[in-house]
Image (tube, helix red, strand yellow):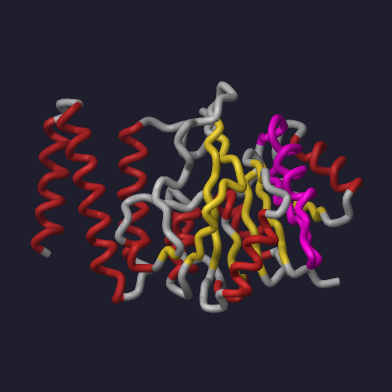
Amino acid sequence: MTPVVSVCIISYKQEAFIEATLSGAMRQQLNVPYEIVVGDDSSPDSTLTIIERLASQDSRIRILEKEKNLGMHGNWARTIKACNGKYIALCEGDDIWNDPMKLQKQIDLLENNPNASACFSNADVLNEDGSVSPYAYVDTEFEILSAKDFFELNFNPVPTCTLVFRRSCFQDFPPAYFQSPFADWILHTLLIQKGDYIYLPEKTSTYRKHDGGVWSGIKEEKQLQNKLKALRLIRSIVGDSFKNANASAIRKQLDKLLYFYRGQKQHGKFWKTWFELKILVFR
């Protein structure tokens, strides 16, 4: 039976987390058939062994193995491509779905909003010490996230572990995807130009923040620089109607870097960033 929903999970060296991730996917209560596609990127630990054990207990789990490490971007690309469902739900191998009705709620929203390209929800943030942050992942409440609003932001407001999107709205990744520090930000750039994002105002998932994470494991300056790099790559793939919105986001990020360099008394980098900002403003 062809699945209506494909749960798309990537993993790499996540032996401590992957069972909780898969358990959250396996206990989803859906009134349509679904598959769980797991792309393991040649994990050197016992991650794959745990996935294989769970797959032997649940026929919905399909494993994509790779002898050679592809990296996160390559692993996302090949795992998404392997999904067969009308809808694709993303989750990384260290995050958790808490609500067993998560997927059904999001599919219902997408079915009732046929012009929307995707749906996402809020999420708890789990710190490395096991405490839950008092601040939720999404700090702005809205019903719909439009393309214009999205491209004006100098950050990605969407928890990857909550995203469900229409497979018909996605064709393939452009070269800019593989150059971006953030794979998910480029995916949103492609999808949201095809239709709005519907927001489910519930914490359906838990985003795990730890030193091994792609984002939380790097220092502040590198985080700021990576955001700027991503925004510039986004500029190369957005339509003309969103260029001004993206330019606004780049200006905001350059401002962030200015404040950072001033606080750190890095005068050379401060003035270099200041000139970049002025050039953008008067372009």
Q: Is residue 7 left or right of residue 122?
A: right
Left or right of 133 on screen, residue 69: right
Q: Is residue 268 above or below residue 128?
A: below
Residue 76 rendering spot, x and y as whole percentages: 60, 55
Which residue is at the front of the view, 120 or 82? 120
Q: Quadrant of residue 268?
A: top left
Residue 223: x %, y % from top left: 36, 39
**Magenta span covers which residues?**
13-42
Q: Quadrant of residue 269?
A: top left
In the displayed structure, would residue 252 be above or below residue 16? below
Q: Is residue 33 magenta?
A: yes
| Depth order, front residue of 178/136 | 136
- What residue appears at the point 84 percent right and 56 percent down from the top-left corner? 60
Asked if residue 133 can be seen in this view, the reply is yes
- Residue at 60% x, 74% y: name it: 112
Horizontal relation, residue 234 to residue 202: left or right? left
**Residue positioned 11% across, 57% down in the render:** 279
Q: Is residue 88 above or below residue 75?
A: below
Whether residue 66 appears in this view of the structure is no
Which quarter of the image is occupied by the C terminus? bottom left
Residue located at (31% from left, 34% from top) = 221
Furthest-right residue in this view? 57
Q: Position of residue 164 (x, y in %)?
A: 60, 61
